[in-house]
Amino acid sequence: MLGMALGFAALSGINLYLTTFLAGLAVHFNWINLADKYESLAILENPWIIGIAGVLFFVEFFADKIPWLDSTWDAVHTFIRPVGGTLLSLAALGEMDPAISVIAALLGGGTTLITHATKAGSRLLINMSPEPVSNSLASLGEDGLVLGGLGLMAVAPAIAFFVFLTFLILAIFLLRRTWGVISKGITALRNRQKKTALS
C-alpha cells in the first residue's frame, strides 16, 4: 500500500493526468486485479474521471512540448498536481484513522510538490537553451517514466516503494541543484540590467 501511495504521489508531480488516466483504464478494463486493500482505487474507473483525465492529458501532451508554454503550464499546475497527488495517494491507502489520514495527505502532497518542482525547474533550464527539441525529448521521457512507474506499481508494489523512495531522494538533490542554478542565473541577469541602466 505504501508503494502504491508513494508511486501515485511521485508520478502525479510529473504528469497527473496521464497517471490518473492510465490507472483508471487499468482498473476499468481489469488489466490489474484490485486486492481488497486497494478497493478504494475502484473510483478511478469512473467514466467521467477517465474521460476528463484523458482530455486533459491530450492537452498537456502538446502544451508540454512547446518551449515556455510548458513552464507556464507547470506554474499553473503548482496548485493542481499536489492536490491530485494527495487524493490519489489517499485512495491507495484506503480508510485510515483520521489523524493518520492527515499525516498521509501531508506526505503525499509534499512528495508530489517535490517531483513537480523538480520537473518545473528542469524545464526552466531546458527553455534557456536555444533549440526546441530538448523540450519534446524531456516530455516524452517523463511520459515514459510515468508508464514505467505505473507498470512497476502493478507488478511489484513492494519493490516500487523502495524505487520511488530512491527516486524521491534523487529528486530532492536535483531540485536543490536546479533551482540553485536558476537563482544564480536570475541574479546575474539582474546585475547585468543594473549595469546597463547605469551606463
Image (cartoon, rainbow, N blue to C red):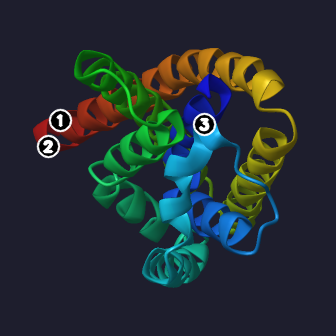
- Decide which of tag 3 and tag 2 comes sooner along the chain: 3
Q: Residue at x 30, y 36 (%)?
A: 192
Q: Residue at x 70, y 53 (%)?
A: 142
Which residue reaches farthest front? 36
Residue 162: give x, y in percent of width and height: 75, 17
Q: How many marks?
A: 3
Determine the CA span between mark 3 and mark 2.
Answer: 64 Å
Q: Residue at x 41, y 56 (%)?
A: 74
Residue 118: give x, y in percent of width and height: 52, 35
Residue receiving disc 1: 194
Residue receiving disc 2: 197
Q: Vertically, is 192 above or below 176?
A: below
Describe the element under mark 1 as helix, strand or loop.
Answer: helix
Describe the element under mark 3 as helix, strand or loop.
Answer: helix
Callout 2, which amino acid? Ala
The answer to whether 175 appears left or right of 65 in the picture is left
Q: Residue at x 74, y 49 (%)?
A: 150
Determine the CA span between mark 3 and mark 1.
Answer: 60 Å
Q: Which mark is residue 37?
A: 3
Mark 3 closeness class: few <14, some 14–19, many ≥20 residues within 10 Å = few
Give the mark toward the camera: 3 or 2.
Answer: 3
Contact? badges 2 and 1 (CB < 8 Å): yes
